[in-house]
Structures are given as structure tokens and as C-alpha cells.
Amino acid sequence: MTQVKSEFMLALNQICAERGIDPRMVIDAIKTAILAALKRDLGLAEEEALVGYEVSVNEETGAITVTKDGKDATPAGFGRIAAQVAKQVIMQRVREAEKDAIIADYSDKIGSLVTGMILRFDGPNVVIDIGRGQAMMPQAEAIPNEFYRLNQRVAVYIKEIRDTYKGKTIIVSRSAPELVKELFAREVPEVGAGSVEIVAIAREAGHRTKIAVKSTEDGIDPVGSCVGQKGVRVQAVINELNGEKIDIVEYSSNLVEYVKAALAPAEGFEVNIDESKRKVTVTVPDDQLSLAIGRGGQNARLAAKLLGFKVDIKGVTEGSVHSVTGEEEFEIDRLGLGSKVRNTLLDLKITTVKELETKLDSLKATIDELDPRAFVETGKAIARFYKKADMAKEEAEKAARFAAEREAENR
């Protein structure tokens, strides 16, 4: 029999009470860990069973007993090992309890804005200190054309609690449309108070966002409230998003008026609506066609997302129809290119990184006209894209190995 001082049980009960842990769960974990340590001490292979062995812990005195077939079978010097194992198990359970408490706390904060500080980079992901705990911003949740540095403070949107190979993880985002909504709620008192409502948001993170707003109280200008005096409120949001352009339009229950607002800055067009097919057909004066579609089709895409309708845009005399559903996304958006280069590439029907890589040399003159530095930066962006893809593949393989190991342990 190995005696562990009763002070151990007092300390265990105190720690468990402070951390909200069931002492019996800790004691069961100690028993399991001691059996594993005993198996190693006896030189048994991992798959061999400890037939007839049993560990008991006296909950009053803390005495740990190892028996085999009902007889004392504690190896010589096993007391030190038992004490060490007990200490490790308690520390592990405390850490798990603290993490569970943090996860529970942030589960209630899903859908809210928080400001954190970048701690480190985990492959293509960014690990952020958000106060009580740490959160992960996966590559897909980052703004494509943003670069992050250690100790940088960033505003992020708490998106979800996700099961990863590291356990439950707080996932945050800077590319989510909801981030823009929460930033306006912070910067615009009327939005925070509910007297101005953000009805819809369409976003291409890092490039442009359109939001539709309406007033819930008489006498309040929803667009003016969001813009602020001399644009100070919307500029605060733009600054937080590192220069992302933001269009604010007034929502209308009159769908024709709403379509016209959503397609601004184009004007003077006719609108036909088929609500059963959720389709809008817009006939635009020829001199307004490029404005309605936007560079690379961006204005039309954002309008379609804002409306939740398919949008067909055609000129008065031109026969071609530009059709968007609001669901279009392009691989080159993940490169973080400047808007001018990105939109030029989309105009040239280049939407994938592979296409761009293949045609890059032939596009040098075109890109140089937009920005003399852009050609080199585009090449670097392509290299980063492939490097991140390789790192993401490694992370996925690591997660698969971890899951397989956990499954093998539980067999």
C-alpha cells in the first residue's frame, strides 16, 4: 500500500471546488493513469491487459492501493510514481476545466465583436489573444489582401466554436459580412440602439461592401446616421477594414426602388421583377452600363447578394446580357490583389490562380500600367498562395493522424 498524505485529498477537494470539477472524475482519471504507469513499469506492451490488477484511492486519507486478484501488488518505490501521476492528472484536469469554462463563456458571445492581439501564426492560421482565451482565425476567415504581424491589435467577429484536432476552438473572422455589421453597431449609436437597422450586407472582403439600412423610428436618416458628420463614422469602419470601400444604401420595401438603390451609382434604368423566379431584369442606358456592372462585375454581384435575387443587366441598344446570382466567388480573390489589378483580371476572364500563373508574363505590360509595383507583388502573391496551400495540406494531414491516434486509443 502506498500512503499519500491526507493533505493531498484536502488540496484536491479545494482545487476541484475552485475550478468546478467533480473530484470523483479526477480520482477515476488518477486510477486510469496509475494503471497505465504500472503497465509501463511492468514492461507490458501497450496492447497487453493488466489482468486482475485494480487501483483504489481512499477518498478520506488519499491512500492509493494497487492490488492483483485482491492482494497487495504495489511495486517497490511506486509511491513516488503514484504521487507524480496524481499531480499530472490534476494539472491536466484543471487545464481542461479552465478551457471548458472559457469555451462556455465565449459560446455565449458567438456573433459579437471583440478586439484581440495577434500572438502567433499556426501554419496558415492566425492565433489571437481575445482576453480570457485564445482564438484561431483560419486562412479562409482572413481578409485576402491583409498582412498580419505579431502583437498587432485587430477587431474580429466571433463566428463559432469548432471541433479541431486540438479540441474545441474559438473561431474568429475578419472576412465575415457580420464583422461589418458589428463595426457599424460600435461606431453608430443609432445602429447600436436599434433605431437604424442594417437589413442586408453584401461583401467581397478586402475590396468592397454594400449595406442596406432602414430607420425604425420617424425623423432618423438611416444613411446619414451611418455616414456621420463629414463621413467620420463610416470612415472609422473603413479604417478598421484597412481601406475596404463601403457603399451605404437605403432599404425600401418597394422592390423597384430597392433595386435602383442597390445598383448605384448607375441610374436612369428600367426594372422588371419576376418574384416567383426571384429574378430582376434591368435595362440600363448604354452610358450607365459599365457603372451598373462595375469593374469585373463587382457592382452587379454585390447588388445581387444584397437583393437576394438573380440580376440580369442589359444595355438599351447592346444585345449582350450580364447575369449574376450574387454567389460568384473567384480563386484569385484569395491572393489579396489590389482592386485595380483584380478587376482587370476579371475583365480578362482570369479567375483562377493557375490561369493567372500561366498568363502572368504576357500580362506584365497591362499590370505595369495599373501600378509599376503590382507585377512583382502579384508574383509574390501567387507564391504565397501555393505555400499556404501546402501548409494547409500539412495541417489537414496532421489532423487526420491525430484523429486516427485518438481513435486507436479509444479502441
Image: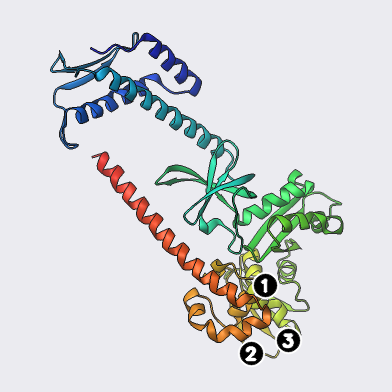
The residue under the point 20% across, 17% down is 76
The residue under the point 29% across, 48% down is 404
Q: Amino acid at mark 2?
A: Gly
Q: Amino acid at mark 3?
A: Asp
Q: Identify the residue under disc 3.
A: 286
Residue 252 in the image: above or below residue 187: below
Residue 14 in the image: above or below residue 315: above
Picture quarter with the C terminus: top left
Q: Position of residue 96 (x, y in %)?
A: 44, 32
Q: Identify the residue under disc 1.
A: 299
The one of 58 and 276 positioned closer to us in this rendering: 58
Q: CA distance from mark 3 to mark 1?
A: 16 Å
Closer to the chain start, of discs 3 and 1, is 3
Q: Identify the residue under disc 2.
A: 319
Q: Position of residue 360 (x, y in %)?
A: 53, 81
Q: Which mark is residue 176?
A: none
Residue 374 in the image: above or below residue 239: below
**What crowding class fits label 3: few (fewer than 14 Cα within 10 Å), some (14-19), or many (20 or more)?**
some
Q: CA distance from mark 3 to mark 2?
A: 11 Å
The residue under the point 61% across, 45% down is 117
Q: Disc 3 on helix, strand or loop?
A: helix
Q: Amino acid at mark 1?
A: Asn
* Left or right of 64 on screen, residue 280: right
Q: Position of residue 17 (x, y in %)?
A: 48, 18
Q: Disc 1 on helix, strand or loop?
A: helix
Q: CA distance from mark 1 to mark 2?
A: 20 Å
**What crowding class fits label 1: few (fewer than 14 Cα within 10 Å), some (14-19), or many (20 or more)?**
many
